[in-house]
Image: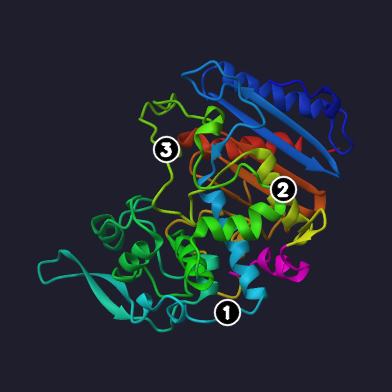
Amino acid sequence: MTDHSPSINATGFDPDGLTRLCEVIAARVASGHIPGATILLHRHGQQFEAAFGRQSPCADAPMTMDSIFRIYSMTKPVVSVAVMMLAEQGRFLISEPVAKYLPEFEGVQVGVEDKDQSGLPVLRLEPCIKPMTIQDLLRHTAGLTYGKFGTPTLVKAAYCASGVEEIFLTNDEVVQKLAALPLAMQPGTCWEYSRATDVLGALLERVCGQTLDIVLRKRIFAPLGMIDTGFWVEPARQHRIAEAFDIDPDRAIEVQLHDIRHQPRLLSGGGGLVSTARDYLRFARMVANGGALEGVRLLSRKTLAFMTADHLAVLPGAMNGPAYLPGPGYGFGLGFAVRTDAGGAYTPGSVGDFNWSGLAGTYFWIDPEEDLIAIWLMQAPEQRDAYRQLIRNLVAGCLS
């Protein structure tokens, strides 16, 4: 672990809590549960950061605060911010149908599971009662899904068979394949974790006339000084890539993460970015500051407040789907899970705090009531759920 003794006494953090946090994570590394990790806390203008273990279980290089991680779905809040930047500039209304800008989705139908005369499951198609909107994409109520996550269904099986889950597609090709598949449910009725943010990435490309990497670099990364965030890692920086165990030590299964050493064909708005804790902090500080950072404004304060409000309360039954990932105590805004109750969740927090996470083990949250930003980065996908709760509990013990 790097030496951060000056930060231990930072205003707003309890020194004993920080020491305890570091001891717990260092013990998890020492026992072989994770190769390494970084944590960054920002509160009342003070910052605590620590790096633990090694960048890779196959090398001796220590983890550092400059280590680069696959952040997977922590890409989604970034893309959602870019979408709302265009909405704020009058490029579209989020109430508009997706098909207005991605005409491939015109006439898409909903797949309903039924049984044939022999009692075997079949998929019956029904027309959409109302079209999916850009707002539906932002809040995961568009009727889309993922083929590889959650309880198997006939629609998910169709996703897997279609090849839409492949990584060797362009965003246009993803849209073409998705639009040819049935929706998992009627748009605007149920929260379902999905390829929706990939579609938002394609929307950004169509509206801006540029590929998604250029859109995000020009509109977010360059203005905020996020120098290590992008869709792949160039050779000169590849010595900083954090890696996972080949075999997960708890479940004894193979760990497969996407290759970030070569420029990808798919610029996934739902999960393609790499970043560092310090880089992502700049994005998180902009969000926490109401859309601005160090004199650079990306969004208005009202738009950020709109994005981090719960957008599901007006949809009866929206959280009653087969797998509601934000979990108890949380609703969902436009790109973020949003806490709606002080109780009910598995971890301490404040009403109004918001978060999201990534498949390989990354997680962040912003608690406006506590003036707190917390960023946790590791590459241990099979252990991600437990570590999100562990880190929330440990950080709660650091607040003075």
Q: Find out whether residue 284 is within the magenta segment.
A: no
Task: Say which residue label 1 marks.
Answer: 92
Q: Position of residue 133 (x, y in %)?
A: 50, 77
Q: Find out whether residue 308 is within the magenta segment.
A: yes
Q: Earlier in the sequence, mark 3 or mark 2?
A: 3
Q: Residues within 10 Å of mark 3 (few under 14, many from 20)?
A: some
Residue type beneath disc 1? Phe
Quadrant of the rendered image containing residue 8 = top right
Task: Say which residue label 2 marks.
Answer: 282
Q: Give the extent of the magenta segment.
A: 298-312
Considering depth in this image, is 280 or 329 the residue closer to the camera? Answer: 280
Q: Position of residue 178 (x, y in %)?
A: 34, 66
Q: Position of residue 312 (x, y in %)?
A: 58, 69
Q: Is residue 90 visible?
A: yes
Q: Residues within 10 Å of mark 1 (few under 14, many from 20)?
A: some
Q: Is residue 100 above or below residue 202?
A: below
